[in-house]
Image (cartoon, rainbow, N blue to C red):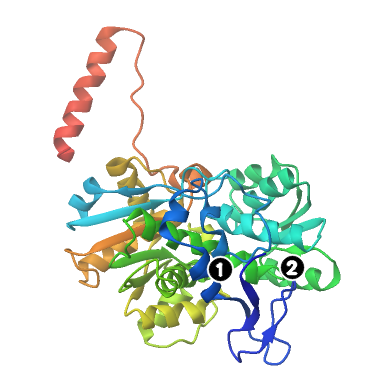
Amino acid sequence: MGHVNGLKCRECGREYPVDPIYVCEFCFGPLEVAYDYKSIASALSREKIKQRPETLWRYKELLPIDGEPQVGLDSGYTPLVRADRLADVLGVDELYIKDDTVVHPTLSFKDRVVAVALTKAKEFNFDTVACASTGNLAHSVSAHGARAGFDRFIFIPATLEASKITASLVYEPNLIAVDGNYDEVNRLCSEIANKYNWAFVNINIRPFYAEGSKTTGYEIAEQLGWKAPDNIVIPCASGSLLTKVWKALKEFKQIGILSEVKTRIFGAQATGCSPISTAVKAGTDVIRPVKPDTVARSLAIGNPADGFYATQVIRETEGYAEDVSDQEIIDAIKLLARTEGIFAETAGGVTLAVTQKLIRAGKIKRDESTVICITGNGLKTQEALQGHTISPYYIKPGLASFEEALGKIKIATDKEGR
């Protein structure tokens, strides 16, 4: 059996049994999984973790499942890349990329949360899974749900990038494209979840689903040699990933895996959808909903469910939040690709561009260790780069034509100082 005591309201503290529920019936606050950390501390150690397969399930005692994992058995344990070339450009000493663009079956961190959510859906005996998504979650639920034998209903904004729609349709779910933004899609899904007995991973299964994000934090600490970095920069859509990475570090300290945690947590958003960073910069925890207008569609949640809690974590850790323009996002995607060979989707461009801004402002010190979370592969959002990349050199199939192009390449290289 697992180590879960039950569910607990994040506002009033009332306790609930382990059921597919997500809202406190007394104060309507969100529910969160509560663990027996004493039993976890006696069951889990660095040595035991290191002996296990390199997947997110190496930390299974800290995840809200009762038995063995049933879904997402190949997800997790993505690389932590020492980014020295990028560090030189940014002018910092120690920089790492937590690279969730690779390893995961659908090439985004959403495979972490879906692995936990669908395992829990199996335990609850659901036969249908569903989600509201800006893209990556749609891919992950479609793929993992197919392999696990679920019926799948996927709800997305109809304006989602064509490549992201195709990347879900290939798994043949029931894909519902809604004429509205993500917040409108999510409201519709809440109504549907109240009527149909389906496992909506980010609604009635949300308390369990969100816990999968903690594995990002566990992996960072383990891959740094069992220590927490000085800074972590995390993209914010709902704000959940940010809160769970911090929860992971605190849990590792509580059960004795880490000796100390002094990490500052930084939030990254696009200016066209920045309710969390706007609140942080204003010195308030009041989240004012916005209508998204940004190329970073995977972060385009105008009314973030965990926005308030994200501001609390940022304040608790003495971090900060920033936002960046669409052009800064695109420039950062290209910078990461040409320095470290990592192709990030637009959310990754947001995170790197915000990191640059934080370093220039002195909020991230140049002699500190910093981890940047890159959460999805750039192949998912190629449309964002159309018209923003260099052009190929077209030549005839002969040496003279090549050497003419080579001369142009040398001139361009000298001009750009490359």
> Is 311 placed above or below 387 here?
below
**Residue 63 - label:** none
Q: Quadrant of residue 354?
A: bottom left
CA gap, disc 1 to disc 2?
Answer: 15 Å
Identified at 33% across, 24% down, the residue is 393
> Is mark 1 in CB contact (under 8 Å) with mark 2?
no
Q: How many residues crowd mark 2 within 10 Å: few (<14), some (14–19), many (20+)?
A: many
Q: Mark 1 highlights which residue? A: 301
Give percent across and percent down for residue 375: 46, 54
Q: Mark 2 highlights which residue? A: 189
Identified at 40% across, 59% down, the residue is 350
> Is 232 placed above or below 112 here?
below
- Three-letter code, disc 2: Cys
Give percent across and percent down for residue 278: 41, 78
Helix, strand or loop under label 2? helix
From the viewer's perspective, is 172 left or right of 75?
A: right
From the viewer's perspective, is 32 left or right of 118?
A: left
- Three-letter code, disc 1: Ile
Give percent across and percent down for residue 139: 63, 49
Q: Quadrant of the N terminus?
A: bottom right
Identified at 62% across, 49% down, the residue is 72
Identity of the residue furthest to the front in this view: 42
Identified at 85% across, 71% down, the residue is 195
Q: How many residues crowd mark 1 within 10 Å: few (<14), some (14–19), many (20+)?
A: many
Depth order, front residue of 113/311: 113
